[in-house]
Image (cartoon, rainbow, N blue to C red):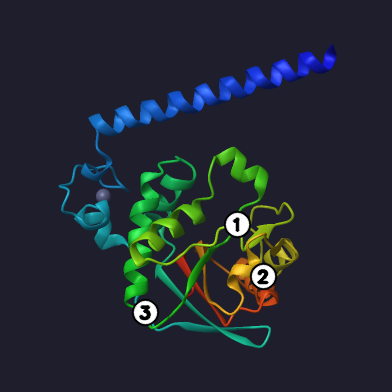
Amino acid sequence: MQGIQIFCMRKTNSLWEGFGRYTKQLCSSILELIFPSHLYCAICGNIIDETRPYSLCDHCRDHIGWRLKEPFIAHVYGEATRCISCCSYGMYERRLIFRLKYNKKKSTAAIMGEIVADRLKYSEIEYDIIVPVPMEKSKERKRGFNHAFLIAKEAGKILEKPVVEHALTRTKKTRAMRGLSPGERRANISGAFALGREAEKIMGKRVLLFDDICTTFATGEECIRVLHDANPESIDFIAFSAKNF
Ligand SMILES: [Zn+2]
């Protein structure tokens, strides 16, 4: 009897969750019709015309630290990894990233994906597949999406490159990286990833690892270490926003 009650409660909860999701989607579609997101700057919200690149007003676009540097070469366990980024890690870049991650404005992923695609077009890096850094499962459930995957998917669509979402998986919860020293970050992220259920797709391939933010490269380095176990031909790295390259 208790089992049936629990089953019914779960069923009711999932129905309400489904209804809640549907209502949210409906509301955001209606809002999108009334206030189309491409008519407002994705950072400051000022009105723009739809010809503005990346849905940014001139002021915000001029305040982003765009990066077109030569790749920084990181040596991860004896293998050379070319690392590039689209922009620096300043206030304007953070506002764009936080709009997607914390305000859950998914349309931002298309803007960021377009920026990533343009950056890759102006780079010498060649790759067959894109692998986004995975999120810890409970965090992803809470947010409702993996922001790195959404951005990579949008970039992949433009570049016509497959995105392998489950090449890597997150195996443990980690503390928030903010406020940790480089050594603490490395210890925190150590052992946090394993090869995922799609790892065989990267064997013999030129892999491009993608993350939204790179501050000390501790996460990137740990992902690359694990990805090497699947025998890719090469691994390179792109971050949307990076502190040092
Ligand atoms: Zn703006």
State the mark number for residue 134.
Answer: 1
Q: Is residue 98 above or below residue 34?
A: below
State left or right for residue 227 relative to residue 86: right
Q: Position of residue 149 (x, y in %)?
A: 50, 55
Q: Amino acid at mark 3?
A: Ser
Marks 3 and 1, how far apart at CA? 24 Å
Mark closest to the chain's N terminus, 2 or 1: 1
Q: CA distance from mark 2 to mark 1?
A: 12 Å
**Which is more toward the observer, 30 or 9?**
9
Q: Is residue 66 visible?
A: no
Q: Is residue 167 above or below residue 16?
A: below
**For the residue labelled by badge 3, is the local secondary structure a helix, a strand or a loop?**
loop
Of callouts 3 and 2, the N-terminal one: 3
- Quarter assignment of residue 74: bottom right
| Residue at numbered disc 3 | 123
Tally of marks: 3
Q: Is residue 225 at all visible to an observer of this figure?
A: yes
Residue at the spot of label 2: 222
Q: Nearer the viewer, residue 166 or 171?
A: 166
User: Which label is found at residue 235?
Assistant: none
Quick one: label 3, few (<14), some, or many (20+) residues within 10 Å? few
Element on which disc 1 rests: loop
Quick one: label 3 or label 1, which is nearer the N terminus? 3
